[in-house]
Structure formats: C-alpha cells, structure tokens
Image (cartoon, helix red, strand yellow):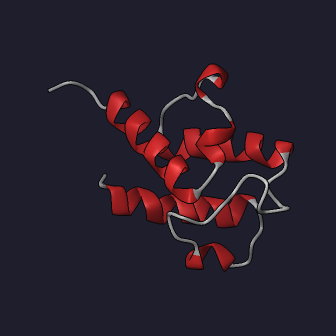
Amino acid sequence: MDHAQILGQLLGLIDDVLSLDGRARDFTRDTALLGALPELDSMAVVDLIAALEQAFEFEIALDDIDGDTFATVGTLQDFIAARYSAALPSP
C-alpha cells in the first residue's frame, strides 16, 4: 500500500468514525485534527485508533501515541505508513 492509498483509506476512516458526512474528502495533509475538529475528542481518538488497527491490520501500543501523532492528517498518515511498513512480513 502506498502513501496515497493510505491517505485515501485514512480520510475514509476519519469521515466514518467522526461522522463528518463527507467533509474529510476535502482534508489535506496539512489539515489540523486534534484541537481543531470538535468531533475528535478523547473517545473519538480511541475509536479512531481501533478503526486504524482493524483497517491496517496492526496493533498500536498506547505508548507509541502522543498528541503530535494526531496533530494533522499528514502526521497521522506518516505514523500509519511507518507502522504499516513495520508490520509487513520480511521477504
């Protein structure tokens, strides 16, 4: 899965989990998340983490997450890309 595919799937998850009714389609890597979207409260972060784990088929340790991870769409995309790559089986 490449970076663009990760972004597309991430935006879909954000839209679904936060019930944004399609608004996330217009988000870019620079779109602020935590503190900027009222829908992204602490419970929504937990729900989003669970959705990410299921969609990308890897576990996210709570120690690996901080506020910076959810700062923007881009920081979350980069976090997912790194975890996704690390979860792939070695050739």
Q: Position of residue 38 (x, y in %)?
A: 85, 62
Which quadrant of the structure image shows residue 67?
A: top right
Q: Residue at x 37, y 29 (%)?
A: 87
Q: Position of residue 65 (x, y in %)?
A: 63, 31
Q: Residue at x 79, y 54 (%)?
A: 35
Query: Which of the pair 48/39 is nearer the observer?
Result: 39
Which quadrant of the structure image shows residue 54?
A: top right
Asked if residue 90 is positioned above or below residue 49 in the image, the reply reads above
Q: Position of residue 15 (x, y in %)?
A: 67, 67
Total number of numbered discs in the rendering: 0
69 sits to left or right of 85:
right
18 sits to left or right of 57:
right
Q: Position of residue 74 (x, y in %)?
A: 50, 56
Asked if residue 57 is positioned above or below residue 31 in the image, the reply reads above
Which quadrant of the structure image shows residue 59?
A: top right
Q: Quadrant of the C terminus?
A: top left
Q: Residue at x 45, y 61 (%)?
A: 7
Query: Which of the pair 83/70 is nearer the observer?
Result: 70
